[in-house]
Amino acid sequence: MTQIRTRLERGRGALGPALSLVHTGRAATRAVLTAELGVTRATAGAVAAELEALGLIRVDTRPTGPSGAQGRPSHRLAVAPGGPVALAAQVHADGFRAALVGLGGELVATAPGSMTVPADPAHVLGAVVDAGAELLRASGRVCVGAGLAVPSAVAEPEGTALNPLHLAWPAGAPVREVFAGEIARAGIVGPDGLPVPSFVGNDVNVAALAEHRHGAGRGAQHLLVVASGHRGVGGALVLDGRLHTGSSGLALEVGHLTVEPDGRPCHCGSRGCLDVEADPLAFVEATGRTPGPEISLLQQGRDLLREEYGDPAVRAAAHVLIDRLGRGLAGLVNVLNPDRILLGGLHRHLLDADPERLRAVVADRSLWGRSGSVPLLACALDHNSLVGAAELAWQPVLDDPLAVLGGQPAV
């Protein structure tokens, strides 16, 4: 036992990196973990044992090699079933959604809510936190933190919503402060008995983080994500595993690229921006349909593309939006030179409807796109903003598992 503890002391600084490797699916066995961390097999074993003792991973010692294989098979590593979760929340123009998300980006439970979002952020944030608290009570699982995704640039470190254009919130609303207050009010506490830490991020930024760690963006060094959710268009860039947010959180506001110089007035004061020319409202109106209150605009647009694409009006409207989106993407390719582009929300379904048309527009209008070297793919995670919001809450655990769950700092 003394030898094991000594090995752990030597490898304690590897706990966070080891957990990150399992969390992102890059270390399915102890042999891979040993190689990735650059430590001895004994140290990797001690690190894995400590993470298992903390309830974060499971170490399976059953044989995994083929029958007759040489040597001793490596132990398998996986996220622990029934382990801790993060509370994730998302607010959008049509309401909210709460979820519990485990390690590995596992969506454990989710609860949607439909409401008109009022000017006071506390109203909707109180509702989404209450929904999340109910999910936690039903699950009986430990909560490590809470993350919130909002359709606005978020100033750091204050956590204020700088430009919530599609919500009634005032610019500069102290969203993190309000969210943290609602978490405390609801009695959501962590392993230390104190209210769990709260985090806030732009919805497309955190979606990009989730896709990079668990979805279609795995392995990309320069990942560009563009998405249209319930209203508007957002973008995000992940560089070498880190979100690029700029000097004040306003980087990659791609919704305000002009794609129709004489187009619709935009909330930003310009005209013809992607935000108003290539979102679900623009698509539904272009088909000649009237946006209805019974379902969200995103759902209405998705249903039209999936179920009525044979209608000439729907197809023509899709072609118009694809061309606008392609022009915007081509400009981004010229400036950013990403190695992969992911599309989410309505844009994901536009890509599915006519992938060749969209790829052709991007290729024709971009220097780098003409070589065919920029893959254009759909986001893989259905609730990537929720998974990404949870990533914000999981990060302190990934940085220092013992400090959060073991009550002592890593060495």
Image (spheres, helix red, strand yellow):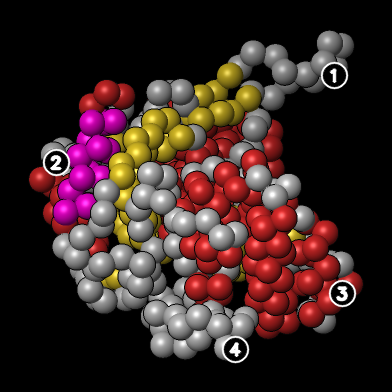
Depth check, mark 4 against mark 1: the one in front is: 4
Magenta-drawn segment: 123-136
Q: Secondary structure at mark 4?
A: loop
Residue sitting farthest toward the top: 67
Task: Give the residue type at disc 2.
Answer: Ala
To which residue does mark 4 refer? 261
To which residue does mark 3 refer? 370
Task: Give the residue type at disc 4.
Answer: Pro
Dot placed on the residue nearer the N-terminal end, 2 or 1: 1
Taking the spot 56% from the left edge, 73% from the top edge, the residue there is 277
Taking the spot 50% from the left edge, 72% from the top edge, the residue there is 275
Task: Give the residue type at disc 3.
Answer: Arg
Query: Whole-Å distance between the Cαs marked 3 and 4?
Result: 24 Å
Q: With 408 as the anchor, is 334 left or right in this view? A: right
Taking the spot 64% from the left edge, 41% from the top edge, the residue there is 307
Taking the spot 32% from the left edge, 50% from the top edge, the residue there is 95
Is any atom of residue 234 visible in this view?
no
The crowd level at tag 3 (other Cα within 10 Å; few <14, some 14-19, many 20+) is some
Q: Secondary structure at mark 3?
A: helix
Depth check, mark 2 against mark 3: the one in front is: 3
Cβ–Cβ below 8 Å for labels 2 and 1?
Answer: no
Q: With 47 as the anchor, is 394 left or right in this view? A: left
Residue 187 image offset from top left, x and y in percent:
13, 39
Depth check, mark 3 against mark 4: the one in front is: 4
Q: With 184 as the anchor, is 134 left or right in this view? A: right
